[in-house]
């Protein structure tokens, strides 16, 4: 009842298995979200183009266009590119997750999933989206860290921490979107322009170095095995 005054966020769910679709809709509905279900990517894309939505839950194995193709279409269309996407799929292989993230998905959940986790991820992605629209580019304050790109300065509990340029950029990139998983490739692209070549292996080395320098805040840098890294939200 207390939710009725709030603007309800709308979630489009693309899922060809009816029982799973109903289960997700029922549980998100209970949380106060508006939901719309689609059995094919084509229908969902059409709907998202016409009147958006706040979030899309996307299955990968679909009749017709598969989830990756749907994701490409959504992320290459200015009407839909800003709508966050969470992949919900039985394709739990790391390579699929990496592909999904690199195509622009915000997060992923593998089937079978816990409904609690699903709801938590949905909340987290929607919250991040709201925060992003409120916070201007630049200064990041998170937990007890302050990251100031203008001064190229990081402070932990008000004490400055000395980072290399690459470490700084990796930290800034991850901390700007807390909770979001970045693949090693995405991190490499973000720090490109430095004077040396960054490889998968160097990303791992940089993160290890960062964790040490960040001391207690090092634990905010989470390893997502086989995929990449994220800054804890
Ligand atoms: Ca499916």
Image (spheres, grey):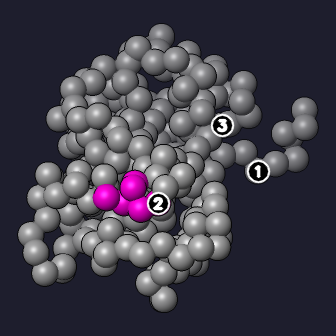
Image location of residue 199, percent across then percent down: 11, 58
**SS assignment at label 1:** loop
Instruction: Give the farthest residue toward the left.
Output: 197
Residue lying farthest to the top in this orientation: 19
Q: Residues within 10 Å of mark 1 (few under 14, many from 20)?
A: few
Does 210 appear in magenta? yes
Question: Pointer 3 and pointer 1: residues touching (CB < 8 Å)?
Answer: no
Disc 3 and disc 2: Cα gap in Å? 41 Å
Q: Is residue 75 above or below residue 189?
A: above
Residue visible at 82% across and 48% down? 6
Question: Which residue in the structure is indicated by mark 3?
Answer: 34
Q: Which of the numbered marks, if any, corresponds to residue 214?
A: 2
**Mark closest to the chain's N terminus, 2 or 1:** 1
Along the horizontal axis of the image, is 111 left or right of 151? left
Observer-side mark, 3 or 2, equals 2
Q: Secondary structure at mark 3?
A: strand
Residue beneath disc 1? 7
């Amino acid at each position: 009842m207390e939710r009725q005054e709030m603007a309800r966020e709308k979630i489009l769910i693309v899922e060809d298995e009816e029982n799973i679709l109903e289960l997700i809709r029922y549980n998100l509905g209970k949380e106060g979200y508006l939901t719309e279900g689609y059995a094919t990517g084509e229908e969902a894309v059409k709907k998202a183009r016409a009147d958006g939505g706040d979030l899309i839950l996307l299955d990968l194995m679909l009749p017709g266009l598969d989830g990756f193709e749907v994701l490409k279409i959504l992320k290459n269309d200015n009407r839909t590119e800003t709508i966050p996407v969470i992949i919900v799929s039985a394709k739990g292989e790391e390579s699929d997750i990496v592909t999904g993230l690199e195509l622009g998905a915000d997060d992923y959940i593998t089937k079978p999933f816990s409904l609690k986790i699903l709801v938590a991820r949905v909340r987290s992605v929607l919250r991040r989206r709201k925060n992003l629209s409120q916070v201007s580019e630049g200064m990041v304050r998170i937990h007890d860290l302050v990251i100031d790109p203008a001064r190229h300065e990081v402070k932990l509990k008000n004490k400055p921490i000395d980072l290399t340029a690459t470490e700084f950029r990796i930290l800034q990139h991850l901390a700007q979107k807390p909770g979001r998983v970045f693949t090693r490739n995405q991190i490499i692209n973000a720090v490109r322009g430095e004077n040396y070549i960054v490889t998968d292996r160097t990303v791992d080395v940089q993160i290890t170095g960062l964790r040490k320098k960040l001391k207690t805040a090092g634990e905010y840098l989470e390893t997502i095995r086989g995929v990449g890294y994220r800054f804890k939200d």
